[in-house]
C-alpha cells in the first residue's frame, strides 16, 4: 500500500479502497476528538495556501478552521490576490508556493490546473473542487453514510440530477472503490460520459447503474442531489431547469422509492424548490447539516495523513 504521507488528492482514482478506509477511520476519530474539545496542535509550524478561483463556504471554512485550530497557518488567496495563470504561469506559481508552504488547496475551473500545481509545487495538493471532480466532498458523503448505517455493505446510493457534474463524478468513483452501488439518474444528455464509466469499470469491480428513469432509485438507502446549474454554467440555467424538473427529490419520490430509514444528502449550497423540495430538505431524513460539518473533519483527516503522516 502506498503511504498517504506526502500524497496529493486530485481525484479518487489514485487511491486504493484500503487508503480511503484509512482516511474514513481518521475522519471519524478527529470528529470525536473535536467534540471532546481536543485541539492537539498537530499542524503547529505548518502553513497551507488556499487558492480559490470560485466561491466557497464549506470547503474554505473546513480547510481554514481544521488547519488553524490545530496550530497551522492557512493563507487564503483568491485569484483577485495572486497572479495564478494571469501574469504568471501556473507552473511558476506552483514552484514559488511549494517553496513557502507545506501544502496547497485549489478550487477552480480546470482539473489541469490542480494537476499542474501538484506536478510543479513539490508539496501535497488537495482538490477543493474543479469542473471535473470534488473529491473532498465525496469523503464527507461516505463518512455521513457510515454515521447513519451499521455498514456500507449492500448499500445503494441514488444520485438524481446532473449526472455529469463534479459531485456526481467523485461520488461515483468513491462508491465504486468501496463496493457501494451507485445509481446515477439523469436525463440522457446529463448522464456520465462513457469514458468515465469505462474508467470506473476498469478500476473497480462495482456496478454503476445509469438510468433516465427515476424508478431506478427503488430501494435506495441514500437519495443524493446537487444543484442543477454548477458554478461557471450560469448561461445554461433555463435549459437545465426544463430538463431536470422531473428529477426533483421530493417526499413523494422518497416515500415511493425509498425506505423509512433512507437518508437525504446534498453537498450544498442548495436551491430549495429546484433539485429538492422544502419538505425533504427540512425533513427528518435529511442529514445535510451533519454532512456539511463532516467536510471539516474529513478534510482534517486528509491533511493529517498527507502532512503529518497521521494515518
Ligand atoms: N459543498 C461545497 O463544496 O460547498 P462550498 O461550495 O460552500 O465550499
Ligand atoms: N456542482 C456544484 C457543487 C458545489 C459545491 C458546483 O460545481 O457548483
Image (cartoon, helix red, strand yellow):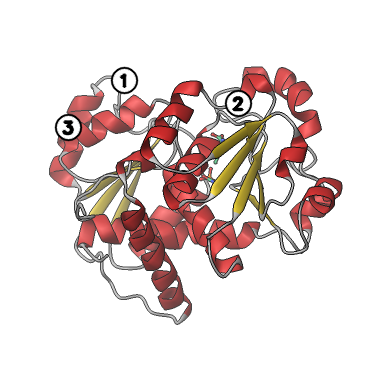
Per the model, the C-alpha gap separating discs 3 and 1 is 17 Å
Q: Nearer the viewer, residue 118 or 63?
A: 118
Q: Is residue 97 left or right of residue 161?
A: left
Q: CA separation, marks 2 and 3?
A: 34 Å
Residue 221 as seen in the image, left or right of residue 151: right
Near-viewer residue (175 or 107): 175
Residue 300, compared with residue 183, is above or below; it is below
**x%, y% of residue 167?**
53, 39
* Residue 120 image label: 3
Going from N to C along the chain, the mark reached first, 3 or 1, is: 1
Q: Residue furthest bottom?
A: 36
C-alpha separation, residue under disc 1 versus residue under disc 2: 34 Å
Image quarter hosting the N terminus: bottom left
Q: Is residue 248 visible?
A: no
Q: Which mark is residue 86?
A: 1
Closer to viewer: mark 3 or mark 1: 3
Instruction: Name the residue that disc number 2 marks.
Output: 191
Residue 154 in percent (x, y) is at: 57, 57
Amino acid at each position: 500500500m502506498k503511504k498517504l504521507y506526502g500524497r496529493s488528492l486530485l481525484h479518487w482514482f489514485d487511491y486504493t479502497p484500503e487508503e480511503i478506509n484509512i482516511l474514513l477511520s481518521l475522519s471519524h476519530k478527529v470528529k470525536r476528538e473535536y467534540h471532546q474539545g481536543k485541539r492537539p496542535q498537530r499542524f503547529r509550524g505548518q502553513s497551507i495556501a488556499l487558492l480559490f478561483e470560485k466561491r466557497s463556504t464549506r470547503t474554505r471554512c473546513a480547510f481554514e478552521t481544521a488547519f488553524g485550530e490545530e496550530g497551522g497557518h492557512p493563507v487564503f488567496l483568491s485569484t483577485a490576490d495572486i497572479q495564478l495563470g494571469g501574469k504568471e504561469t501556473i507552473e511558476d506559481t506552483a514552484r514559488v508556493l511549494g517553496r513557502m508552504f507545506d501544502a496547497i488547496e485549489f478550487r477552480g475551473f480546470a482539473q489541469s490546473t490542480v494537476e499542474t500545481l501538484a506536478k510543479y509545487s513539490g508539496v501535497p495538493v488537495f482538490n477543493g473542487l474543479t469542473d471535473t471532480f470534488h473529491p473532498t466532498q465525496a469523503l464527507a458523503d461516505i463518512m455521513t453514510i457510515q454515521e447513519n448505517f451499521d455498514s456500507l455493505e449492500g448499500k445503494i446510493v441514488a444520485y438524481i440530477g446532473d449526472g455529469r457534474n463534479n459531485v456526481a463524478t467523485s461520488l461515483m468513483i468513491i462508491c465504486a472503490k468501496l463496493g457501494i452501488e451507485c445509481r446515477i439518474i439523469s436525463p440522457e444528455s446529463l448522464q456520465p460520459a462513457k469514458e468515465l464509466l469505462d474508467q470506473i469499470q476498469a478500476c473497480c469491480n462495482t456496478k454503476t447503474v445509469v438510468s433516465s428513469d427515476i424508478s431506478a432509485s427503488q430501494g435506495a438507502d441514500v437519495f443524493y442531489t446537487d444543484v442543477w446549474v454548477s458554478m461557471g454554467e450560469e448561461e445554461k440555467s433555463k435549459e437545465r431547469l426544463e430538463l431536470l424538473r422531473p428529477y426533483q427529490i421530493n417526499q413523494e419520490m422518497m416515500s415511493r422509492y425509498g425506505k423509512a430509514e433512507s437518508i437525504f444528502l446534498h453537498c450544498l449550497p442548495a436551491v430549495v424548490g429546484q433539485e429538492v423540495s422544502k419538505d425533504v430538505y427540512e425533513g427528518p431524513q435529511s442529514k445535510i447539516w451533519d454532512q456539511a460539518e463532516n467536510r471539516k473533519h474529513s478534510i482534517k483527516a486528509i491533511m493529517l495523513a498527507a502532512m503529518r503522516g497521521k494515518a
